[in-house]
């Protein structure tokens, strides 16, 4: 009887200790807070602890990717985004952010694939169309870039930045009249905003 009682007390104490331990979500929240306060190294440690407790949480991997990207660790960020995508293949922001890094690395074809996947999942997301248009512009694929910028304009006609980009691409194509019209529209929207 004494042994059973001692075991019960031990299990009760162990249960209380476990209940007081931070959860994966607690570590994630702590990581976000540290990230928002610019304490990147500690935020990474908090995200890693959250991942250790729950490795199947795509949002933790995604946020770790954002943090690594902010630190200039693009390859590590891509690995984190890849893990988020592996866990949740419909994670639009992970596809988009991975594409932006690849674009910045000059890996345009890989970036386009990421943007295309993100667009399949969220075709009304103007930011993805914008990023794809910029990537196509970098490749000199001006006709395709203009189509992407036109889609952004259809989705968000008051976005002055896309009008500027469209103007630049049209100018590169030698379509000066259209480029000037797009530039004028950008200036008009900028003054309204």
Image (cartoon, grey):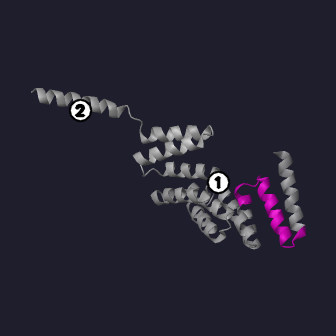
Image coordinates of residue 132 in percent, x first then y, are 68, 64
Residue bearing mark 2: 11
Q: Viewer-proximal residue, 174 or 67? A: 67
Residue bearing mark 1: 72
Q: CA distance from mark 1 to mark 2?
A: 47 Å
Q: Quadrant of the C terminus?
A: top right
Residues rendered magenta in the picture: 152-176
Q: Quadrant of the N terminus?
A: top left
At 58% across and 60% down in the image, what residue appears? 75
Q: Main secondary structure of the magenta part?
A: helix
Image coordinates of residue 24 in percent, x first then y, are 43, 42
Relative placement, left or right, of 148 versus 64 is: right
Is residue 14 covered in magenta? no
Q: Viewer-proximal residue, 85 or 46? A: 46
Return the residue found at the far left: 1
At 71% across and 69% down in the image, what residue appears? 136
Image coordinates of residue 8 in percent, x first then y, are 19, 29
Q: Residues within 10 Å of mark 1 (few under 14, many from 20)?
A: few
User: In this rendering, which labeled residue sits more in front, label 1 or label 2?
Assistant: 1
* Placement of 150 over or under 58, stated as above or below: below
Quarter of the view holding residue 95? bottom right
Q: Viewer-proximal residue, 124 or 76? A: 76
Quarter of the view holding residue 176? bottom right
């Amino acid at each position: 009887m004494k042994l059973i009682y001692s075991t019960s007390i031990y299990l009760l104490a162990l249960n209380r200790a476990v209940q007081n331990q931070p959860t994966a979500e607690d570590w994630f929240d702590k990581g976000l807070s540290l990230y928002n306060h610019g304490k990147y190294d500690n935020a990474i440690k908090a995200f890693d602890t959250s991942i250790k407790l729950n490795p199947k949480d795509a949002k933790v991997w995604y946020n770790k990717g954002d943090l690594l990207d902010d630190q200039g660790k693009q390859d590590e960020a891509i690995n984190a985004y890849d893990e988020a995508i592996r866990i949740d293949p419909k994670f639009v922001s992970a596809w988009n952010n991975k594409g932006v890094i690849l674009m910045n690395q000059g890996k345009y074809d890989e970036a386009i694939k990421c943007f295309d996947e993100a667009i399949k999942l969220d075709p009304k997301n103007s930011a993805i169309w914008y990023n794809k248009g910029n990537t196509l512009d970098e490749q000199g694929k001006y006709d395709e870039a203009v189509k992407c910028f036109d889609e952004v304009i259809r989705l968000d006609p008051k976005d002055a930045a896309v009008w500027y980009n469209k103007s630049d691409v049209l100018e590169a194509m030698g379509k000066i009249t259209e480029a000037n019209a797009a530039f004028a529209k950008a200036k008009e929207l900028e003054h309204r905003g």
